Image (cartoon, rainbow, N blue to C red):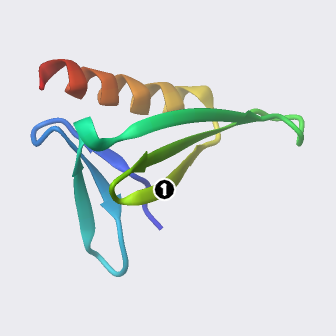
Amino acid sequence: MAQVRVDVAEKCLAIPQWFFFTKKVPLSDVHKELKIDSSSGKHIYTLKLTGNFGEQDVTFNDYEGYADFVYSFEKAMMTS
């Protein structure tokens, strides 16, 4: 399944749903929480997104992917 992505133009998160539909949630309705798991010897970054859409976990295998997502999220928040 595809990952959650930040839509900077519309200032929302595009959350994949079933088939090819996505749910767009305004950034102001989203809260994020980071969890880092290193039990396997490798850091796995999981970002828990919560809001009126429920909960969605987004997992990143490397710090660069996590940092890119958070940067896009914060950039979109600052321009809204």
- Say whether residue 68 is left or right of residue 45: left
Q: Quadrant of residue 12?
A: top left
The residue lying furthest to the bottom in this view is 19
Q: Residue at x 53, y 26 (%)?
A: 64
The residue lying furthest to the top in this view is 78
Q: Is disc 1 surrounded by few (<14), some (14 to 19) or many (20+) residues within 10 Å?
A: few
Q: Residue at x 10, y 42 (%)?
A: 10
User: What percent of the width, then of the height, locates residue 37?
Assistant: 77, 37
Q: Quadrant of residue 63?
A: top right
User: What percent of the width, then of the height, locates residue 44?
Assistant: 71, 39
User: What percent of the width, then of the height, locates residue 42?
Assistant: 81, 35
- Say whether residue 15 is left or right of residue 65: left
The residue lying furthest to the front in this view is 52
User: What percent of the width, then of the height, locates residue 65?
Assistant: 51, 34
- Say whether residue 54 is left or right of residue 30: right
Identify residue type, mark 1.
Glu
Compared with 16, 63 (above or below) is: above
Q: Nearer the viewer, residue 37 or 25?
A: 25
Q: Residue at x 41, y 33 (%)?
A: 69
Compared with 6, 14 (above or below) is: below
Q: Nearer the viewer, residue 19 or 26?
A: 26
Image quadrant where one finds the C terminus: top left
Count of residue discs:
1
- Say whether residue 36 is left or right of residue 13: right
Residue corresponding to mark 1? 55
Q: Residue at x 37, y 23 (%)?
A: 71
Compared with 26, 69 (above or below) is: above
SS under mark 1: strand
